Amino acid sequence: MESALLYLLGVVIVVVGLILSIGLHEIGHLVPAKKFGVRVGQYMIGFGPTVFSRKVGETEYGVKAIPLGGYISMAGMYPPAKTGGKARTASTGFFDTLVQEAREVSREGIPEGQEDRVFYKLPVLKRIVVMLGGPVMNLLLAFVFFTIAICGFGVPGASTTVGFVVECALPATTTQTECEPGDPAAPAAEAGIRPGDVLVSIDGEPITEWVQSTVIIRDSAGKTIDVVVERDGEQLTFPVTPMLLERYDLDDPEKVVQVGYLGIGPATELQPQPITEVPPFVWDSSVRLGELILTLPVRLGGLVVDLVNGDERDPDGPVSIVGVGRLAGEITSLDAPVAERAVTVISLLGGLNLALFLFNLLPLLPLDGGHVAGALVEGARRGIARLRGKPDPGPIDTAKFVPVTLVVTVLLGTMSVFLIVMDIVNPISLF
């Protein structure tokens, strides 16, 4: 029962984190839009039927039933067919109708005398600021979550505490997984060193990092050295002779070398990092997520192959919000220290926001990056016209890209549904 409640807690944390991320993303659009005078009719978290809404000033704020997205409704997202022109009735086909309806919806809700309070009339730079406000908010949230995780809790690292002691000494290249009669006893186990012992010194050298013990032991094959540990508040000394054994080289993991061996390994612990470690961590995570997003269609095809072959999912592969919720549930229901569970869930929320930031930068409508790309092209076109002494060509008619927007929306929706199904029938499991 307790495990089920903890699992549910993990799911709830992700749902609340998602709603918070969506809400702040839309605030990132809302604040600069209002600052620049654009009329904003709606600020909504979610899609589908409205659960709650309240009108404050000219803007209706509300929450909808499906918390998988959000939007703000800005007047004049699409310009007329011609600068200063009026809408015309489309009668040449389905896509023309879509374009015309997009223009009509874009003009709705603009009171008389406020025709200039439209998005498309903003200078290019201001439009870019409005559209980048949402993704930048997600990037800031990613920094906040990762800072809490890395600096507040820490990253797993080798401590000076003995985490395990092996019973027998086996070469690195062996395929044997269990000790068998006749296998040589590992020196540490034979000497009486136990898991939980804290290394104090080895061969007279104080140990402050586990790597120090590794270097000393590897260089001391056949030589008796004193290993001093702290156990239950008392210091104990164990004379131990590291045996010569095949191990993988520390500098070249594919190379096998003969070195000293005791048969002990470190316990991991969370080690808080300085704040200067956060930017490189976010950058490395962005590179990995960027590669995943750019290869998403191929990765989705791989999920089908994994399902057909009965293979386990790649834990570093794409997941939907359902998959993130399941992972969070697994983590919170673990029998592990609270700090370790907390740092993993917080990191999940950081990764979620980083993914939202990167995904929204794709130069495709209806994503924010598509609107930014349109503004940049318009700015370049107007700049070239000025240099050539030509008349201002006016705003780009982004309404003409509504059919492309529809296709992209359908594709993204299909991929999302597919990924949700995969997260149900063949989910990623960390444990």
Image: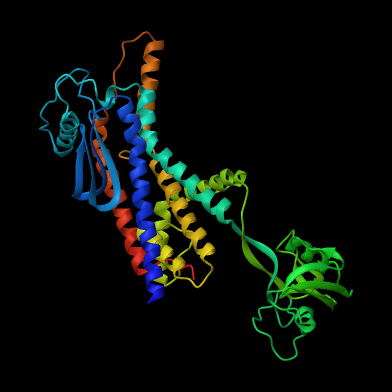
Quadrant of residue 304 within the rendered picture: bottom left
Tell which residue pokes out farthest to the front in this image.
233
Task: Please tell me whether residue 383 is drawn above or below residue 23 in the rendered image.
Answer: above
* Residue 50 in the image, given as x and y percentages of width and height: 18, 49
Check the image and name the residue furthest to the bottom.
Answer: 181
Residue lying furthest right in this view?
223
Q: Is residue 288 visible?
A: no
* Corner quadrant of residue 199: bottom right
Image quarter hosting the N terminus: bottom left
Q: In the image, 362: left or right of 257?
A: left
Viewer-nearest residue: 321 or 98? 321
Q: Residue at x 52, y 51 (%)?
A: 148
Q: Image height check: is 137 above or below 220?
A: above
The residue lying at 68 percent from left, 64 percent from top is 159
- In the rendered view, would you say 69 is above or below 123? below
Judge left or right: residue 88 versus residue 125: left
Q: Is residue 167 left or right of residue 400?
A: right
Left or right: where 26 falls relative to 136 = left
- Residue at position x 76%, y 81% in the image: 186
State the image coordinates of residue 17 (x, y, percent, origin top left).
38, 53
Front residue of 163/1: it is 1
The answer to whether residue 37 shows anywhere in this view is yes
Render colour scheme: rainbow
Number of labels in the image equals: 0
Placement of 9 over or under 119, stated as above or below: below
Q: In x, y percent, where is residue 392?
A: 31, 13
- Measured from the top left, where is residue 109 in percent x and y? 16, 30
